[in-house]
Amino acid sequence: MALDKSYKDVPGTTIFDAEQSRKGYHLNQFCMSLMKSENRARFKAGERAYLDEWPMTEDQKQAVLARDLNRCIGLGGNIYFLAKIGATDGKSFQQMAGSMTGMTEEEYRDMMIRGGRSIEGNRSIGEKK
Amino acid sequence: MTARITASVYTSHVPAIGAAIDLGKTAEPYWQPVFTGYERSKAWMTANKPDVIFLVYNDHATAFSLEIIPTFAIGCAAEFKPADEGWGPRPVPVVKGQPELAAHIAQSVILDDFDLTIVNRMDVDHGLTVPLSLMCGEPDAWPCPVIPFAVNVVQYPVPSGRRCYHLGKAIRKAVESYDEPLNVQIWGTGGMSHQLQGPRAGLINREFDNAFLDQLIADPETLSKKPHIDYIREAGSEGIELVMWLVARGAMADTPPRVVHRFYHVPASNTAVGHLILENPR
């Protein structure tokens, strides 16, 4: 029997399940390496060369170079791992989260101050249409 | 006399709260309402200092990468260092463990069919240190030893609310069979509604959060049956951290608790902050 993956019906959301984790293993482990300050320095000194040390797909490398977090997540990245790239860039978690929403940093911050994104219309892909 | 669980504390563990404390921003208009909500909590902590805190939290790709992903991990070491999460370690005291009680709980709970991973070396991230800062302020040393208990909420599926609730009951039984009259608090952390990823990032659901708080106090048994999809859909992909609150609630007595404090505020960075202090009847 197939597994229940009803969470695939939640709009604008990618659940980091075993399938995503398998796809993103090296991407996430690359991110993990940025926990060490000497690795952060090496990455900043030459991003492409540093990425080439990891058995990641070309798509994954391009997504990291472009800091396209939505694409990174689609390719198996997990936000807690991807956050290490943001930390290396000196970005806050709010700046990272906002970058995935198509809003400017200011628009996103203001939305949060006004109480966040409403659940209405955001429960399921069907409802969204 | 044996050890006993006297109270439980529930709180969000937003990293930006830790940064606000560490950078001296707690009086800024954005942060002031959050910290005001914890004033009573700090006074309560001072008046009700436990001997040990059993702290349920999750690691955020800090101590555990994708190499090893334990569903439940109990920290049995003598101490745990604040981790460098990429911004440098938080300037907070080293966390002292309670290896004897931790080992006792591990043995009892594993024999009760919960397969814990035993961790003898681990750095602890904001998931553990932010709740300590919120409840204890900025002391030179934390007020008592802490047993870190890490739950996997990073890779799906996380343990069910039901499993967490029953684990709490097994922890209660373990504590009550420890032959020393220790005053133990259990803390459940994480949540409340928030989503940190994708176009739906920034989701907040006040109605869900407040209903969760009501039910956690009054009817945790029913709440424990809430399926994963409800958390993900209604409280955001990271809102599923709330299952950890059920570990702490399950460890409380079966009689109704006394609500010492309840607080809710939106936002702290991307997240709704929820907080409860529940005491067991004496």
Image: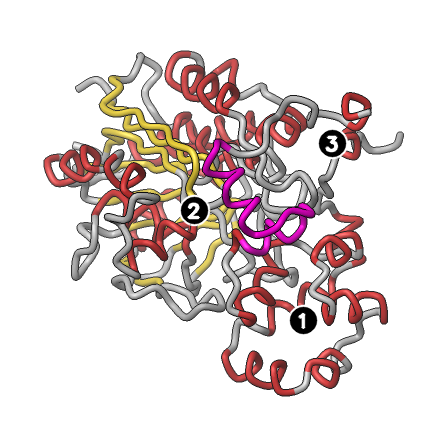
Give the secondary structure at mark 2.
Answer: loop
Instruction: Specify the quadrant that holds the N terminus of chain B.
Output: top left
Name the residue beneath numbered marker 2.
Answer: B14
Q: Residue at x 47, y 16 (%)?
A: B211
Instruction: Specify the quadrant that holds the C terminus of chain B.
Output: top left
At label 1, which amino acid type do we have? Phe
Left or right: where A126 falls relative to B57: right
Q: Chain under label 2?
A: B
Question: What is the C-alpha distance between the residues marked 3 and 2?
Answer: 24 Å
Q: Quick one: which residue is furthest to the left in this view?
A: B47
Whether discs 3 and 2 lie on one chain: the answer is no
At label 3, which amino acid type do we have? Val
Q: Quick one: which residue is furthest to the right in this view?
A: A1
Magenta region, residue range: A95-115
Mark 2 vs mark 1: in front:
2
Name the residue beneath numbered marker 1.
Answer: A30
Of A92 and B139, the residue lying toward us? A92
Whether discs 2 and 1 lie on one chain: the answer is no
